[in-house]
Image: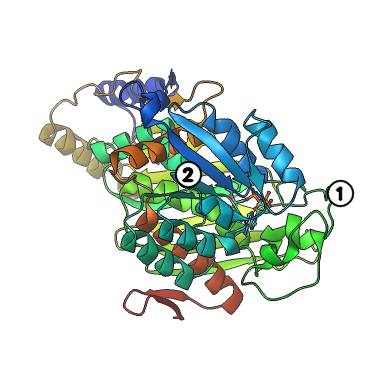
Amino acid sequence: MAKHPLSRRRFIQLGSGAIAATTVAKNILQPHLLSASPRPVAPSDTVRFASIGTGIRGCEHLQASLLVPGIQCVGVCDLYDSRHTAAQEAVKNPSVPATRDYRSILDRKDVDAVIIATMDHNHRHIFEDAVAAGKDVYCEKPMSHTVEDGFSMVDAAQKNKRMVAVGSQRVSSILYAKAKEIYDSGKLGDVFCINAYWDRNSPSGAWVYPIPPDASEKTIDWNAFLGNAPKHPFDPVRFFRWRCFTDYGEGLGGDLFVHLLSGIHFISSTNQPALRAVSSGGLFHFKDGREFPDLIETMYDYPNFRVTLRCNLNNAGGEFIAFYGNKGTLIIKDSTLTYKPENVRPEPEGYSVFGWPKALRDQYYKQWEDEHPEPKPLDWKSDEDGESYGVPSGYSDTADHQANFFNAVRTRKPVVENEGFGNNTSIGCHLANFAYFNKSVAVWDGNSKKIVKG
Ligand SMILES: NC(=O)c1ccc[n+]([C@@H]2O[C@H](COP(=O)([O-])OP(=O)(O)OC[C@H]3O[C@@H](n4cnc5c(N)ncnc54)[C@H](O)[C@@H]3O)[C@@H](O)[C@H]2O)c1
């Protein structure tokens, strides 16, 4: 902390920054969603898609699809019959064909693309069957349930020359686009430290979802749900709260870390997984038979920066990502983005010299002022200090993410969050869980495409 008495000019210098720091301009960003189609979409350009998996996320997708021009939902597929009705309601079309059998969707010639929003362990086989059938694929995050799944999916997509989008929709958000613009402008200086968290404090936030009263082996195709997972007798808790179980999900890593990592990779243009990770955490409160912790904290090493992530299901801290640079700080908190510059102008040292006798200290200050020209006023305009951005009410980054995908289907130009991007961020989740469950450093071995103990 500077203790030296402020000269008039230093007061002006610091004062203008202090005043500016309290002035926060809030800009509402303009959506570019409907730029998904850079021109009006002719009916002949309509992309016909089907949704495989129409639970919570699948229904969100169907609702969001109504905002995207030039697309039409022509089929829905789910293993639980009530979700056929839910899907038809979500897409506002009670007569859209519904089936339990995703292969019958892939056999249809009038389906150009599919959205896969099933439990994570079923992504791979549906994805691989879909690309082999010539469909482009929007696959929900995390792309992979295991490291091996991810590389197999990347190979399948590339072999079949299919367009793929992975579903961390923040990558298409106007807020994240603004964050990337600021990051790329150099206004943050060097960023070596990135910190993010996503904390929730409710049973729903911890996936304690109610079991619908009609759930039974008659209304749910249990064997198809299990897919390649180990056999298990019918258990609606495992079906509806699958995120709690290692056979089907990846806990907080796959549910929330992947969004944070996708945002970080997108903003920093990172195109590789972390080099290594260490995790800590525990299952402290939701001791309901689940296999994943309700608190996990992971530190990742990337070549040029370090990342720390946390998810805590016992405090409602919300969603937060911060990039700490030596010229400024960028923070995304829920749906607001702020950028604050650092005051990096030269200043006389003002701490250790208080251990000097006054005469020497005065001499030091005089010499410093002689050697440094009168500082210019801060070059931050008050409305630039603490830039702040939000999104308009009702903004849907899911619709924007879909729009980017369906545009790629039309143009054959890949989206940012393609299969390679999705594989890298999924590996980040697997690193976190490997480190947590093995109580060891998790090292990414890119040559063997495996995680190994460090
Ligand atoms: N991007 C996001 O913000 C976001 C939000 C929520 C969930 N998700 C992801 O979406 C996916 C689905 O999550 P959810 O919350 O909707 O789960 P959910 O349990 O509500 O729905 C999953 C549905 O998939 C169906 N399904 C599973 N295997 C199937 C198969 N072989 N054929 C047809 N249907 C099948 C199930 O019957 C179930 O209804 C997960 O990968 C999850 O991580 C993403």
Quarter where residue 342 is shown? top left
Between circles 2 and 1, the one closer to the viewer is 2
Q: Position of residue 211 (x, y in %)?
A: 83, 51
The residue under the point 46% across, 40% down is: 170
Q: Position of residue 343 (x, y in %)?
A: 30, 34
Q: Which amino acid lies under the numbered mark 1 shown in the image of this protein? A: Asp
Can residue 3 be seen from the camera position used here? no
Q: Position of residue 437 (x, y in %)?
A: 60, 75
The residue under the point 42% across, 23% down is: 31
Quadrant where the N terminus sits is: top left
Side of 73 relative to 88 (left or right):
left
**Does label 2 point to a residue whose CB lies under 8 Å from ligand 1?**
no
Q: Which amino acid lies under the numbered mark 2 shown in the image of this protein? A: Val
In the rendered structure, find residue 214 and report the number of the disc placed on it. Answer: 1
Quarter where residue 45 is shown? top left
In the rendered structure, find residue 111 and report the number of the disc placed on it. Answer: 2
Helix, strand or loop under label 2: loop
Quadrant where the C terminus sits is: bottom left
